[in-house]
Each structure stands twice: as C-alpha cells, then as structure tokens.
Amino acid sequence: MASLAEGSNSGARGSDENQTNARKSGYFSVNKDVELMVILFVVISTLVVTLRRFAYSDLSPFASGTHSFSYEEKGVANDTEVSQEIQEKAKLQKILKKAVMEDGKTVIITIVNAAWTDPNSTFDLFMESFRIGNQTQKLIKHLIFVAFDEIAYSRCLDGHFHCYALHGDVNFTGAKIFMTKDYLKMMWRRLELLGTILELGYNFVFTDLDIVWLRDPFPHFYPVGDFQIACDSYRFGPTDRRNWPNCGFLHVRSNKKTVKFFEFWTQARNYFPGANEQDVLNRIKFSPYVDQINMTMWFLDTAYIGTFCQQTRDYDKVVTMHANCRIGIPPKLKGLKDVLNDWKRYLNSSGITSIKGPAS
C-alpha cells in the first residue's frame, strides 16, 4: 500500500520515466489487483465470522432443533406507507379505547368477513351465545369486530358494535377454504393485527367467530400467564408444551415479552412456507427463545375451553366451545346449534333464572 502511494505521488510530480517503467512492469495493475483481493478477503471474512456467531448464538431467536434462523431486516417503508400505518394505528387505538374493560387494558377481539355474517350464520350464533351465556352479556360492550370486507363491516355497524375495518391486499370477502393461499394470508394478517394490539399496550382475548361463549372465561384464565391458548388436544399439564394448541382462542397480556414473541412468531412464517400460524406455533413453541425472553406459555384445559376435536359435554364446567375439526360452514353451524340447544336445556334443568350478571 505504501509503494502504491509513492508511485502515485511520483506521478503527480510528473516523473514520466518512472510511470512508463511502472506500466511496463505491470506494477500498477498487479498492486491494484492485490489491494482489491485483500479488501475483498477482509470484508468476506468479517461477514462470515459475524454470521456464524449470530447463527449459533443463544441470542438467535430462531435457534431451535435442527434449525438456526435469524430475524430479517425490515424493509425501509416510504413516507406514504409510514403515514398510512400511523393513521391505521390511530383508528385502531381509538376503537380500543372505546371497548376497553374497567382495567383500562383488556379487549375482546374477533374477525369477521361476509361469509361468516350471512343471516343465521356463525355471526348470529356467536352473538346468541353472549346473550344467553352465564355472565357473558356484560362482555358484549368490550367486543371488537375486525371486518375483512365492507359487507362484514356494515353488518357490524348495524348491530351497533365496536367495528374496525382491516385493510389488506387480498379480497377476504368469501369463505376461505382451509390452507388455501388466501386462507393463509388471512390467518397471518390476523396475527399481525394481534401483534399491533399488543404493541399499543392492550391485553386481549382473541376468539374465532365459530366459538360459542357459555360462561365468562376470565375467572378461568391463569393469573400469571403471559400467553394462554386453547388446545385441540390437552393431555398434559397447563405449562407442558407437548399440548397441541389452537390459535382460535387466546388470552395474551401486553408486555415486552409478548410483543417480542409475536414478532418472532410472525417472522417465523418465512422459514415454514405454506404453513399456517398454528402449525408454525407448534414448531417454535419449543424454541429456546421463548425461555430466553422469559415468556410464560399456558395451555387451557379442553374441559373448560372446549373443542370439537376433544369434545366435552359437561355443562357444569364448559366455558366456551369451538367448532374446529369440522371443515366448512354448514357442519360448524350444525354443531354450534346443537351446543346452544344443549345449553338451553341445561339452564332449564338447572333452574338458573339470572345469567346476565352484574353490569360492568
């Protein structure tokens, strides 16, 4: 490098003879090649060492099992995208403030589209359950319907509920067949929204629309759990990750741990193409990253948070019932109608005359 600088300086002094000799000997070209090679080697070596350290570090959030992943850098959004995001968050926060419970932190969220809001469809059964459930009527005013399309948004407004229009790049109006491309986009868009709600500082209970609420679930949540989730199959203890979770019913408290986890979960989709958010959760739930951020993950007993996958009909216990493990709207409707009819018979036989509960 010093010789190259000296050669350049002599050229500046106008020593034509030295420059001519240097060119003939290939001095400049050789040294430039060497210099470039050294620079490239240093840069590449530095990158390799850095990447290897991150990939195998315990700090890598995707270090799990046979995989080692890392967070992707988020693309730089333009001014228009940033402005739209700020406006959408402001709209969302306004609705959250209106719907929040007395603790000032908690809301209930569900997702609707046109296919689910037809007359006598899941929307009506869902709302009927809140009206006839034990201590559930008081929860209606804390319920936010996130509408994926204009038809669902209008139906929500007609009922005088809290309504939020979720915009996206896909037409979510029709029924989405399980695991199709549009279905996956819908599920991941939903998860992104829930992550945003946590970032805004709100706890939430998320419920699929094909769930009937027979009792107030809040007394049945664990008092210390950051992240609590329903199960398709509950065979172990409440903190045992071998349980098979279902993302249709979640209770999540907003804190740094859950915000980080939802970011981790959302980005994990890039490493499991074609998987829905529930399948990805089943893969990442064992990740050391969950323990590293010290997030507590609890699984809800199907004896209380019921499912058609592992069904209970003990109406002395059941709190909610999810019509999962039935594909398509008609089978879900039939199953949920049967549950509501059974519940009505249970109330009559039990002599329960007041199920509204105190005003809240």
Image (cartoon, rainbow, N blue to C red):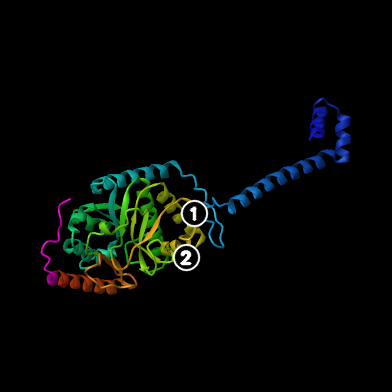
> Which picture quadrant has residue 83?
top left
State whether the magenta stretch is mostly helix, strand or loop.
Answer: loop
Left/right of residue 354 with respect to residue 92 in the rendered view? left
Asked if residue 352 lies in the magenta stretch, the reply is yes
Residue 109: percent from the left, percent from the top?
Answer: 29, 55
Residue of label 2: 274
Residue drawn at (75%, 43%) of the image = 38
Q: Residue furthest front?
A: 237
Amino acid at pointer 1:
Tyr
Amino acid at pointer 2:
Gly
Q: Nearer the viewer, residue 196 or 225?
A: 225
Task: Please tell me how crowded label 1 is: few (under 14), some (14-19), or many (20+) other residues with Cα within 10 Å.
Answer: many
For the residue labelled by badge 1, is the local secondary structure a helix, a strand or a loop? helix
Asked if residue 319 lies in the magenta stretch, the reply is no
Residue 174 shows up from this direction: yes
- Number of the label disc, if any, that sits on residue 289: 1
- Number of the label disc, if any, that sits on residue 230: none
Residue 169 shows up from this direction: no
Which residues fall within the magenta stretch? 348-360
Residue 28's place in the image compared with 227, above or below, is: above
Residue 262's place in the image compared with 19, above or below, is: below
Residue 89: percent from the left, percent from the top?
Answer: 34, 45
The quadrant in which the N terminus is found is: top right
Q: Nearer the viewer, residue 185 or 199?
A: 199
For the residue labelled by badge 2, is the local secondary structure a helix, a strand or a loop? loop
Residue 305: percent from the left, percent from the top?
Answer: 30, 65
Nearer the camera: disc 1 or disc 2: 1
- Gap in Å between the C-alphas at discs 1 and 2? 23 Å
Residue drawn at (28%, 50%) of the image = 106
Number of numbered tags placed on the structure image: 2
